[in-house]
Image (tube, rainbow, N blue to C red):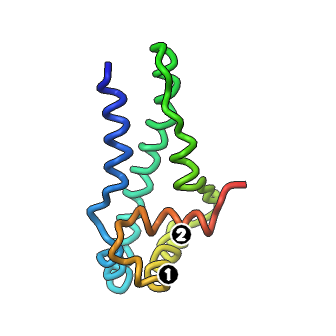
Amino acid sequence: MRAPITLAISLLASSANAVTTGNQIHGMCQSDRTAVLAYLAGWMDRQSLDVGIANSLPDKLIKEGRQPPDLSVLMAFTGAICIPPNVERNQIVDLVCKALADHPENRNKGMNAIILPALHDAWPCG
């Protein structure tokens, strides 16, 4: 029964290994913000999937009599993000495009390294 653990870990790891860089999205910010919106919608869906898997993993392992991993390290690393319900999608596009424009030194990084801090700085939980 190692498959669920391996699957969850590989899904979490695949999110960290972004194919898309800030340089690519920055170019889209300049020319096609609708494409940025589409990218971010997919990115947020993926994050929701990863969080759902991470949240269900400990319960599944406990039912199987195994010790769940400590996910608090992952949460402390990424930070908790609480986007208010009245935030419009274009605000998120503006925020990410601004982060790319304001920090060109980060554009070579994968998008997780750009999006997560930008969202956390704007809307931390608590």
Residue 76 higher or lower than 8, as above or below: below
Identify residue for label 2: 118
Residue 37 point in image, percent of width and height: 40, 68
Please give the residue where the numbered disc 1 appears in the rendered image.
98
User: In the rendered structure, are the residues bearing label 2 and label 1 in contact, judged by CB atoms less than 8 Å apart?
Assistant: yes
Q: Residue 52, relative to residue 93: is it above or below?
A: above
Q: Secondary structure at mark 1?
A: helix
Front in this rendered view, residue 42 or 100 = 100
Q: Residues within 10 Å of mark 2 (few under 14, many from 20)?
A: many
* Residue occupying image coordinates x 65% and y 60%: 124
Amino acid of disc 1 = Lys
Q: Quadrant of the C terminus?
A: bottom right
Residue 14 horizontal/vertical position (percent): 31, 49
Q: Position of residue 1 (x, y in %)?
A: 32, 18
Q: What is the residue that sits farthest to the left in this orientation?
A: 19
- 29 shown above or below 81: below
